[in-house]
Amino acid sequence: MTKESSNKIQISVLNVFTPYKPAGINYIERKGSEEELQRIFSIPGMQINIKGIRGCGKSSLVQHFLKEKEIPHIATWCTASHTAQLLIENTFHTLREILLQIETTGKAVPTSSYKQSDTGELITQTYFNCYDAPINQTTLRSLLPKMTNDNLCRCLGASGLIWIVEEIDVLPTAEQEDWLNMLILFNGWVNTFRTLRIITVGRIKETGDTLCFRKDVGRKITEIEVPLMTNEELAKIISTGEDLLNVEFAEHLQEELKNIRPGTILPENVHKIFLNKCLKNRIEIRQKERRKIKDRN
């Protein structure tokens, strides 16, 4: 977003400094990781595991890349109580919500990206095929289809949807074998659906991994480790925020940031600190006139 365009719209501070969600308009380019993602996407059937320490910008990287490339996708989040089967069922529930929206409004506008005009129709067709008998909107609301691994591959593959699984590192160890088998199944469908792909996102464990991959699985997965931001990149979060909100933070804040030991502070921390500074100074939207913030707290 250019400075000129930002002057024409009302920008919320909650969309500029985003410690609790992926960065949007204040996304800082991660050139090396973005180029690696682009390279892997050119390989049909190659699944992707994005790993890194908490708060380093993994989800922001993935969301930005998919948005820039206009790649439709849906997301599922893991918890420590999840099973591999529950992840699949939750994804079917997400698909059903999309369908209900299509049935009601004629279009799908979920939290995911749907730039392809025929995506909604393709989801509808493949999802309905997961039932044993013809269904209507009432059936769709009350009955679930056969939630099998193969049916999920068909739904996602035929509609061109990428499946993002966040926080895969918290999946219980006892469930990881079933999940790895799911990855193998996805690879088995690649000859039918060339774009079928899972992107898992998770924190690095003490072993250096997010999941323990068997040899037969490891060949079908490429891991990208998102590095820590440099101090200059962290400072850019602040300067970009200044331009978007038309404010000016005290000069010493960025200078101090440049001088701290690399890795001491994470992007998530910078977003949180400067969100709090803005809210403390009652800056909730872009300012009409340039405003200086001298607060040191």
Image (cartoon, rainbow, N blue to C red):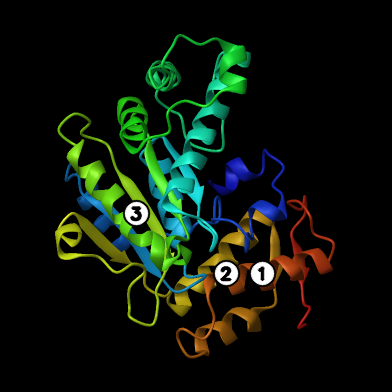
| Callout 3 amino acid | Trp
Marks 3/2: CA distance?
29 Å
Q: Are dots 1 and 2 in contact, CB under 8 Å?
A: yes
Do the CB atoms of the residues marked 3 and 1 lie less than 8 Å apart?
Answer: no
Q: Name the one closer to the observer, 102 or 258.
A: 102
| Residue highlighted by disc 3 | 179
Residue 272, labelled with which disc? 1
Name the residue rendered at 19%, 62% in the picture.
218
For the residue labelled by badge 2, is the local secondary structure a helix, a strand or a loop? helix
Tell me which amino acid carries mark 2. Answer: Glu
Residue ID for mark 2 = 268
Judging depth in this view, the residue of 56 and 239 nearest the camera is: 56
Of labels 3 and 1, earlier in sequence is 3
Q: Residues within 10 Å of mark 3 (few under 14, many from 20)?
A: some
x, y percent for residue 272: 66, 69
Alpha-carbon neighbours of circle 1 within 10 Å: few (<14), some, or many (≥20)? some
Going by the image, does 39 lie left or right of 83? left
Visible residue check, residue 244 = yes
Q: Tag 3, which secondary structure?
A: helix
Numbered disc in front, either 3 or 1: 3
Coordinates of residue 47 in the picture (x, y in percent) = 26, 51
